[in-house]
Structure formats: structure tokens, C-alpha cells
Image (cartoon, rainbow, N blue to C red):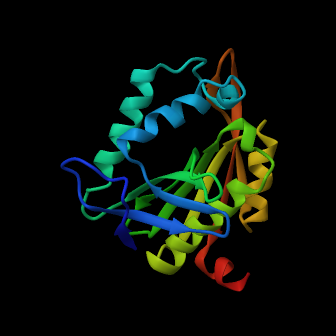
Amino acid sequence: MSIDFPGRTGDCEEFIMLLETERLWLRDFVEEDWEAVYAYQVNPHYSRYYNWTHRTEDEVKLYIQDNIARQTTEPRRDFELALLAKETDRVFGSCHLRISDNDRREASIGYELDPQEWGKGYATEASRRLLSLGFEELGIHRIWSQVIAENLRSGRVLVRLGMRLEGRLRETEFIRDHWCDTLLYAILDREWKAQ
């Protein structure tokens, strides 16, 4: 699963995770990615479903450093990966698979994209690869995702992946000036294999 990636520098490991889809590379973050991430995270459309309205360069650099630090934990439980379009080799988002419970073989997935790339199927494509990683390579039994109920686009992505709506959690997130419900979706390994 880990292969050499030429962008890796410094004292970090020489090998990082690199996954491929038809149009995308999903790879471990490297320090130089902070500028690309900052460029889309400052877009007000991006932060619509977050409880903050502004990102600083320092906050984004810390986000990248935290992700890089988690790449070397053993056993690895957090796969936060940069999304790059093969055509441009530009970082335009991220996706993650996080093992939340080893004993129950359970994990969560999530994604974020530059608003300029919304509606192109990238979130579905990247998430499908993460589901494959979880079920086929890591032996996960159940993968779930939780989204703000108002974020209809994100809910549609999860349904396209074959995930089922399991419930609505009332007022679990405070976004800007109001409480928001969240929707919980999940898929089991046998449901993934049956698709």
C-alpha cells in the first residue's frame, strides 16, 4: 500500500501512501501542500458547513503537520489523504478513513473539496476508493459517515456509494449562529461486496 513518492523530503519516512482512481491520486500529505489547502479553505463556500468562518495560514500549516504526524503511528488508524487531479497534479481537497474501533472493525469516512471542483464526482470517486481500502485491504466491517443535514450534496454522495441513512441526530453541531442536525449513514462489508 505504501509506495515511494518523490515529493517527500526531510527526516520523514521515505515512503508514503498513494492510492489511485481513474481521475485522482489520493496520497499522504506533505508539508508543501499547505498552500494549496489554504487556497481552497479560505473560500467562503468551503466553510459553509463549518463552525468557523476564517482560516489562517498557521491553522492550515498545523492541520498539515498533524496529518503528517499521524502517518507514522503504528498501527496506522488514520488515513487523511490529499486529493490530486491526475490532469493537473494539483491538491484540491482531502478525504479520510479513520478506524474508530479496532475490536468492532469500524471506521468513518469523510471528504472536503475546493468549491470550484464540486459537482464533478470527485467526492464519490475518492470515497469509493476509501471504502475499497477499508473493506478489501484493512478488513473493516462497518464504515460510517456523518454529515450536516442541510448539506444535501454530501448526503447524495453517500447514497451513491451504497450507504444507508441510519438516523438523524438532532442539533449536534453549532454552525455559525444556529444548531444543526446531522445525518448518520453507514455501509457494512457484506453490502459493499454485494454491489
Q: Which picture quadrant has residue 103?
A: bottom left
User: Percent x, y for residue 27?
Assistant: 46, 58
For image coordinates 62% across by 61% down, the residue present is 24
User: Percent x, y for residue 161?
Assistant: 73, 66
User: Percent x, y for residue 72?
Assistant: 26, 56
Query: Is residue 194 something that shows in the picture?
Result: yes
Relative to 82, residue 54 above or below? above
User: Percent x, y for residue 63?
Assistant: 41, 35
Taking depth in this image into account, of 9 and 20 the one nearest to the observer is 9
Q: Quadrant of the N terminus?
A: bottom left
Tell me if 101 is positioned left or right of 70 in this view.
Answer: right
Relative to 74, residue 68 above or below? above
Taking depth in this image into account, of 128 and 155 the one nearest to the observer is 128
For image coordinates 70% across by 55% down, the residue present is 122
Outermost residue, top direction? 177
Taking depth in this image into account, of 84 and 51 the one nearest to the observer is 84
For image coordinates 48% across by 32% down, the residue present is 35
For image coordinates 72% across by 27% down, the residue present is 45
Q: Quadrant of the C terminus?
A: bottom right
